[in-house]
Image: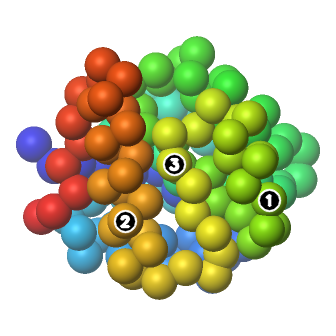
Amino acid sequence: MQKRALVVDDDDSIRNVLHALLEAHHYEVEATGNPQKAIEVIAHRKFDVVFTDYEMPGMNGTQLTRILREKSPHSIVILMTGLAASDLFLSSGADGFLQKPFSEDALRAALVASARGRRANGGSEIPTQG
């Protein structure tokens, strides 16, 4: 079964880069720039991993992470930000953190670390290699 990823970021270029990188790692990818749309999408589809930006209009990534935890507790959530504030990650409830700008190696490391953390806390493994 193909892995599924949701990308939530109001920056078109970040969405496009993540879409391409995740597809290269054999993920089926859906992307939106609107956190409300992400909530609607996750109500109808399951995702192995959700990448969400921290700073977005209408709702920040921490708020979205809390909603995702409630509606899709099995999904790994990786919070992304250009801010140098890892305390945002620690308080968000996300499984992982990705500092912008990021490389493909950083993306892969965030996926692996998040999956390991989820397994260590009793969750299921999310394959990161395709």
Label 1 Cα neighbours within 10 Å, binned few <14 / some 14-19 / many ≥20: few
- Residue sitting at 57 percent across and 70 percent down? 15
Q: Mark 3 — residue?
A: 96
Say what amino acid the circle numbered 2 marks.
Ala
Residue 94 x %, y %: 58, 38
Residue 121 x %, y %: 36, 23
**Does residue 63 appear in the picture of this structure?**
yes
* Horizontal side, residue 106 vs residue 118: left or right: right
Where, quadrant-wise, is the C terminus in this rendering? bottom left
Residue 92 x %, y %: 70, 36
Q: Secondary structure at mark 1?
A: loop
- Give whichever of discs 2 and 3 has the lower sequence position: 3
Where, quadrant-wise, is the N terminus in this rendering? top left
Q: Secondary structure at mark 3?
A: strand
Residue 85: numbered disc = 1
Q: Mark 2 — residue?
A: 109
Say what amino acid the circle numbered 1 marks.
Ala
- Residue sitting at 32 percent across and 43 percent down? 115
* Horizontal side, residue 125 vs residue 37: left or right: left
**C-alpha span from label 2 to label 1:** 19 Å
* Horizontal side, residue 45 vs residue 98: left or right: left
Label 3 Cα neighbours within 10 Å, binned few <14 / some 14-19 / many ≥20: many
How many badges with numbers are in the image?
3
- Give whichever of discs 2 and 1 has the lower sequence position: 1
